[in-house]
Amino acid sequence: MSEFSIAATITEFLVWINGYLWGWPMLILLVGTGFFLTFYLGGVQFRLLGHALYLALIKRKEEGAAEGDITHFQALMTALAATVGTGNIVGVATAIAAGGPGALFWMWIPGLVGMATKYAEAVLAVQYRTKDSEGRMCGGPMYYLSRGANMPWLGVLFSIFAALAAFGIGNMVQSNSVAEAVETTLGIERVYTGLFIAFATGLVILGGIRSIAKVTQYLVPSMIVLYVVAAMYVIFTNLPAGPHVFALVISEAFKPTAAVGGFLGATMVQTMRQGVARGVFSNESGLGSAPIAAAAAQTKSPVTQALVSMTQTFIDTIIVCSMTGFVIIEMGVWDSGLNGASLTVEAFSVGLSGNLGGYVVSLALVFFAYSTILGWSYYGEKSIEYLFGEIAVMPYRVIFTIMVFVGAILHIDLVWQLADTMNAAMAIPNLIGLLLLAGVTRRLTREYIAAKKSDGLSGGPAEPPELIS
């Protein structure tokens, strides 16, 4: 049997496995955990969202001798770097193409409840973090599973799955997406794009988390702002259609349109599944990746960093994904029969003059994918360190950089499927840890709010009224 046929057989097997792993049971488990934590923690993501946004985007860091490697803002940007990626452009378009405009509504649901999941992940990551021999912070699901839940074997499993996922969804599939976009838009051969991305990646990640954070704190806000501004320009130049678009999203969520134009039609179940699945993939709430970055933050309180971390899901899903969805629906191309990146390109091309729309989407894909490589490089590094110790960190960084180039020049259907498998495998031990340690999360949250009340503060942007009421 040839190597090609072996790879094809393995790919088919993984497609079959992923059909079960990412079916309704997993989606219900992920979103159900979000609903449980939302109620158990008293709707913390809604009550304290204003305070959280202030801490994340205005205050940005804690004063005083807070332990950690990077600031609140840098930790948030590192996590956003890994999360805001091709899913915000390709994933949203795929969901709408298959499920209609209502799929956007069902993306919002895992985003809103996923904020509570992301909050709990970060609380536990900071609470149970530790230091390596050089004083660098180490934390994440592997640590709260071993040190908090007393289940070190689950921590090992999570680290194995996360390390493999880092080479898949966090590395090769991203460089492949960049190389494909550049080849299509500019005609540059993949090998040259691969060499450039690998060089740019190695230049950053060989310096560790501080180097990654210094780049992402400028790269991530810039790329998000540019993409959102372009989307808002399209939306506001067609503002009269705005109320109709929003009404269409809500109505189609519960009663999808039958086949029309190039749209094949969808049932409510199909629309719901497409939206929920793509929402989970986009914001990664429950997968256990983002708390690895949260654990490196300079903070005195697990809750403070957790509030910052939960804004990641809000920005990723409620803002960036919504921008893509609104443009596709408002430009009237959602039923054109196009799918994926080509659908998003078509929508922006209709809204912007000339070839500008295609360039905006292609540029966004390049920067979103590159930032994902940087963020996931750190997740993989800490997983490898947990498994093999600090001695394995530098070899990992070198191999990770090389695989960026490999991913750019290969056709990697197998890697895509393996990445999906590893993401699901990561989620299971992480969700077990979140549920077992939910009492710790609630206790720390109550202590934080009680401390703010005892300060006798009267509100304001730093300490909003809902904290002290």
Image: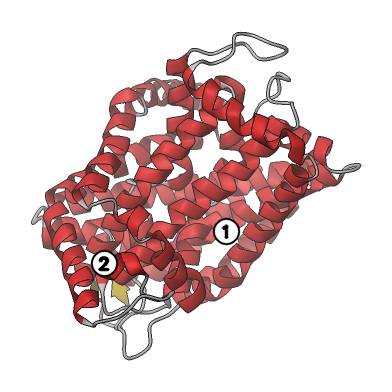
In what element is the residue under mark 1? helix
Of the numbered discs 2 and 1, the one sitting upstream in the chain is 1
In what element is the residue under mark 2? loop
Q: In which quarter of the image is residue 68?
A: bottom left
Q: In which quarter of the image is residue 135?
A: bottom left
Q: Mark 1 points at which residue?
A: 371
Q: Residue sitting at 50 percent across and 75 percent down? A: 58
Q: Residue sitting at 18 percent across and 59 percent down? A: 441
Q: Residue sitting at 30 percent across and 38 percent down? A: 30
Q: Residue sitting at 77 percent across and 49 percent down? A: 233
Left or right: residue 370 compared with residue 239: left
Q: Mark 2 points at which residue?
A: 469
Q: Residues within 10 Å of mark 2 (few under 14, many from 20)?
A: few
Left or right: residue 377 compared with residue 456: right
Q: Quadrant of the C terminus?
A: bottom left
Left or right: residue 198 compared with residue 140: right
Q: Find residue 47 and report its horizontal and vertical position in percent.
A: 33, 57
Would residue 415 be seen by someone viewing this image from the given angle?
Answer: yes
Compared with residue 433, is residue 389 higher up or lower down, i.e. above or below?
Answer: below
Q: Which residue lies furthest to the bottom in this view?
A: 64
Q: Which residue lies furthest to the top in this view?
A: 259
Q: Find residue 60 and report its horizontal and vertical position in percent.
A: 46, 76
From mark 2 to mark 1, how far is it between C-alphas?
A: 40 Å
Q: Residue furthest left?
A: 150
299 and 396: which is toward the camera? 299
